[in-house]
């Protein structure tokens, strides 16, 4: 199965150059028209900052040089261990380089820098940053302790060096910053920077970034089994479709008797589970018992993403619950769809996306391709050319046109909304539930030199018919959040070929960016966001059992090109 990927971006630190203090004196001496008091003030600032300007460090030093304090009488010299300035500088420079071409709206490097530096006040209210008369001034308890010439607006290296210097001096003047630690200082800088952008861009520190990557791509190598207890016996409760145990004879319900020859008798569930883990590619021998017969299966441990698709049959319908979109979700769906098509008498699929907060965009697109013969699944638009895509699919409906219901609720977001919108706009499925979250922004991930990650929003998502997911979300064709009596009335109308949702579906498909918030709220009010209930499944079964209801709901989606190109 072919998969799309975001480009790998390699960041290389750039060298920096600085003007020295004497050059600034020469520049000031030519400004004869400035009042004498102003010139005196500037000369005092220059005197305070001569060492800072002359000794300024490169943006990515390998061996940090301790900087002497500028005002020894005002500094708390106790517990003033230096930060790793090389790490700080490289992270700042890499982040600024990564941010500038990718944010949805254009900003100067100066903006990012000043936003981040204002985070110092959150760490220590006695610290403040001001830009005056062409200088960046750091004040501690209302006393200027550092002043640096303001770099050019888009000078990445210059701003990186200035930020590093300011953080270093602030660190030595602030016990609160030192108690926060180096990671806390960087977190404070980026938290304030991202407060000025969208709600989803963020800085993830090194430790959390490792955990996040593990969730996306798979963590410690294991056998891919979930174990549980049954009358004090340890049994297999699930076999991960992504894991090495999937193609073997291991199955749910088998009793685990030994791992690598070690008996599981009197062992705790956690202990036995830990025995399944080990180095990637290493062998593990699993002895199981089923119906009184024992057998041993040998497999190679592998690092795999957690299972995200769970399936069961309900009468003539197969329910596929997708909990998230990780690196292997589309592959899991492919396996379950293949099995579903072998269920005797199957008459429909129910794809449950309730509570699904999203994940990898390409996995949502690839999953949609498993149920679409051809067409557009999504459109992404951003400033960076690499963020602009028309995600088209063709030639892959594994279900041969089997009727599909998509369940959503107010927690359905991001990649899950992309899948729901794709199936709805292509008239491949009927959406049941409530208005979804409305998260239609895509993040790209930048790896920082310290192991942290930047999640930066770089594109907006449009559904196949051109309407934005951000703010609006996916409006269902059958609404279950208006109460049971209203749901019954909707189903009765559908049975007669009429759809109550036709008006709000048409209104949603006509929205174009930039969106009018009042209009969005009016549309969403027609089927307010809510947490899913059993009524969602009941409505799904009703539509699949009654083709007239299903096709009436399906017909609410306008034909491609019917929505006006403008509007807002």
Image (cartoon, rainbow, N blue to C red):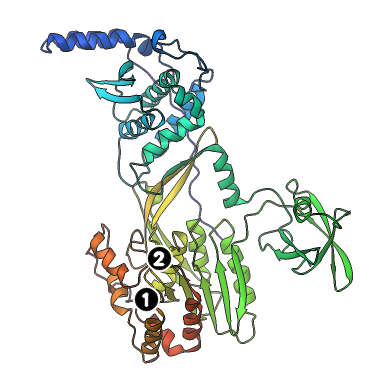
**Kind of element beneath mark 2:** loop
Name the disc covering residue 495, or none: none
> What percent of the width, then of the height, locates residue 344?
64, 85
Q: Quadrant of the C terminus?
A: bottom left
Is residue 218 in view from this perspective? yes
Q: Is residue 394 above or below residue 441?
A: below
Residue 49 falls in image quadrant: top left
314 lies left or right of 131: right
* Mark 1 secondary-structure assignment: loop
Q: Which residue is mark 1?
A: 482
Residue 533's x, y, as percent?
48, 73
Residue 313 coordinates in the image, percent (x, y): 62, 79
Position of residue 203 relative to residue 13, above or below, is: below
Q: Is residue 527 left or right of residue 568?
A: right
Q: Nearer the viewer, residue 180 or 221?
A: 180
Left or right of residue 225, residue 477 in this image: left
Determine the residue positioned at 85% across, 53% down.
260
Nearer the observer, 539 or 283 = 539
> Which of the two residues, 142 or 547, is positioned nearer the viewer here?
142
Q: Are marks 1 and 2 in contact (CB under 8 Å)?
A: no
Q: Nearer the viewer, mark 1 or mark 2?
A: 1
Residue pictured at 31% horizontal, 16% vertical: 144
- Gap in angstroms between the C-alphas marked 1 and 2: 14 Å
Find disc 2 in the rendering and name its residue: 436
**Quadrant of image for the N terminus:** bottom right
* Of pointers 1 and 2, the one earlier in the residue sequence: 2
Q: Residues within 10 Å of mark 2 (few under 14, many from 20)?
A: many
Q: Residues within 10 Å of mark 1 (few under 14, many from 20)?
A: some
Seen from this angle, which residue lies furthest bottom?
496
* Residue 72 sits above or below residue 538 on the image: above
Residue 532 location (% of width, % of height): 47, 70
């Amino acid at each position: 199965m072919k998969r799309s990927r975001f480009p790998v971006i390699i960041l290389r630190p750039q060298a920096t150059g600085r003007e020295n203090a004497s050059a600034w004196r020469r520049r000031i001496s030519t400004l004869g028209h400035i009042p004498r008091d102003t010139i005196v003030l500037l000369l005092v600032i220059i005197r305070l900052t001569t060492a800072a300007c002359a000794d300024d460090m490169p943006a990515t030093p390998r061996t940090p040089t301790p900087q002497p304090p500028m005002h020894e009488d005002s500094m708390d010299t106790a517990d003033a261990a230096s930060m790793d300035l090389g790490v700080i500088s490289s992270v700042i420079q890499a982040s600024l380089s990564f941010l500038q071409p990718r944010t949805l709206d254009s900003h100067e490097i100066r903006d990012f820098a000043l936003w981040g530096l204002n985070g110092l006040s959150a760490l220590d209210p006695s610290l403040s940053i001001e830009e005056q008369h062409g200088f960046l001034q750091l004040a501690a308890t209302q006393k200027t302790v550092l002043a640096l010439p303001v770099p050019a607006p888009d000078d990445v290296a210059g701003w990186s060096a200035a930020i590093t210097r300011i953080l270093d001096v602030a660190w030595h003047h602030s016990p609160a910053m030192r108690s926060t630690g180096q990671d806390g200082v960087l977190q404070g800088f980026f938290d304030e920077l991202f407060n000025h952008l969208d709600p989803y861009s963020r800085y993830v520190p090194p430790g959390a970034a490792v955990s996040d990557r593990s969730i996306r791509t798979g963590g410690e190598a294991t056998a891919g089994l979930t174990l549980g207890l049954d009358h004090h016996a340890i049994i297999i409760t699930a076999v991960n479709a992504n894991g090495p145990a999937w193609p073997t004879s291991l199955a749910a319900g088998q009793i685990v008797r030994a791992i690598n020859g070690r008996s599981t008798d009197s062992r705790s569930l956690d202990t036995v589970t830990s025995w399944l883990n080990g180095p990637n590619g290493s062998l593990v021998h699993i002895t199981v018992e089923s119906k009184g017969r024992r057998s041993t299966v040998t497999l190679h441990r592998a690092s795999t993403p957690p299972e995200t698709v769970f399936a069961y049959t309900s009468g003539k319908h197969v329910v596929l619950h997708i909990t998230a979109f990780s690196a292997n979700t589309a592959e899991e769906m492919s396996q379950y769809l293949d099995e579903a098509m072998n269920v005797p008498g199957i008459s429909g699929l129910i794809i449950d996306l309730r509570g699904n907060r999203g994940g990898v965009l390409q996995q949502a697109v690839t999953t949609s391709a498993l149920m679409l013969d051809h067409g557009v699944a999504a459109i992404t638009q951003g400033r960076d050319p690499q963020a602009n895509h028309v995600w088209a699919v063709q030639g892959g409906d594994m279900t041969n046109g089997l009727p599909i219901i998509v369940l959503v609720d107010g927690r359905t977001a991001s990649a899950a909304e992309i899948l729901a919108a794709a199936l709805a706009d292509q008239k491949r499925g009927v959406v049941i539930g409530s208005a979804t979250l409305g998260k239609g922004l895509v993040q790209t991930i930048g790896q920082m030199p310290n192991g942290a990650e930047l999640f930066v929003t770089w594109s907006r998502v449009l559904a196949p018919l051109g309407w934005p997911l951000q703010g609006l979300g996916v409006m269902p064709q059958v609404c279950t959040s208006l109460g049971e009596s209203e749901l019954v009335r909707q189903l009765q109308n559908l049975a007669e070929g009429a759809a109550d949702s036709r008006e709000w579906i048409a209104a949603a498909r006509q929205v174009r960016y930039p969106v009018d918030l009042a209009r969005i709220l009016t549309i969403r009010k027609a089927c307010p966001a809510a947490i899913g209930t059993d009524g969602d499944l009941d409505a799904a079964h009703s539509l699949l059992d009654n083709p007239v209801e299903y096709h009436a709901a399906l017909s609410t989606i306008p034909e491609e090109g019917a929505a006006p190109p403008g509007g807002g």
